[in-house]
Image (cartoon, rainbow, N blue to C red):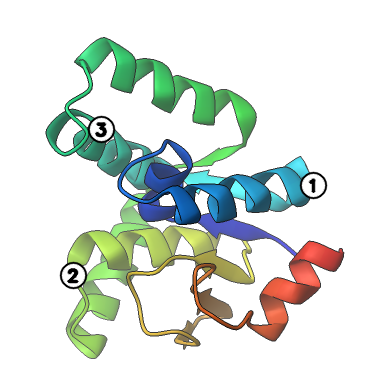
Amino acid sequence: MRAALDSNVLAYAEGVNDAARQKTALMLVRAVSEDAIVVPVQALGELFHVLVRKAKRSRDSARAAILSWRDAFPCIETSGAAMVAAADLSAAHDLGIWDAVILSVSAAAGCRLLLSEDFHEGFTWSGVTVVNPFAKSRHILLESLLDG
């Protein structure tokens, strides 16, 4: 099973805001095999923004962080087709366009899961189920990913 990481998982792993969520995010990326995780390029851009604006890191530090994530896991890029699918998804389900882009490219990359706290838990689109890794109880698909 393949999973994509949303920017909030990356930000928590980087220590933004919440020590408990940081622990959970780091446990996830360490527990799952490297070939089972992908990172949408959009999530890297959002991470850079959060690290500079919210965490008050320097741009050099934020750049180093996104390069580290890029080097750790395969990145999935946004194609023109994925952008159109994201626009359709946004319109049909009242999602923000950038969240829809992340979900769209995750589907195009063959992911079964999108790990994110930004969507409704269990929302499924085009074969991808959104799972909040920070929820009190673990979704069955997340359990399966961790056991895999």
In this view, the residue in front, 36 or 84, is: 36
Give x and y (percent) for residue 100: 30, 68
Residue lying at the far left in this picture: please name it.
53
- Above or below for 23 versus 68: below
Q: Name the residue under label 2.
A: 96
Amino acid under disc 3 = Leu
Q: Name the residue type under label 1.
A: Ser
Q: From this viewpoint, which residue is outermost toward the front? A: 19
Is residue 137 visible in the rendered image? The answer is yes
Lateral position of residue 96 relative to residue 80, left or right? left
Q: Distance between the residues labelled 1 and 2?
A: 30 Å
- From this view, report whether residue 76 is shown above or below residue 119: above
Q: For numbered disc 1, what is the local secondary structure? A: loop
Give the residue drawn at x 86%, y 63%. 148
The CA span between labels 2 and 3 is: 21 Å
Q: Which residue is disc 3 drawn over?
A: 51
Mark toward the viewer: 1 or 2: 1
Q: Is mark 3 on a helix, strand or loop?
A: helix
Within-10-Å neighbours for mark 2: few <14, some 14–19, many 20+: few
Q: State the residue at coordinates (25%, 88%).
A: 93
Q: In which quarter of the image is residue 77?
A: top left
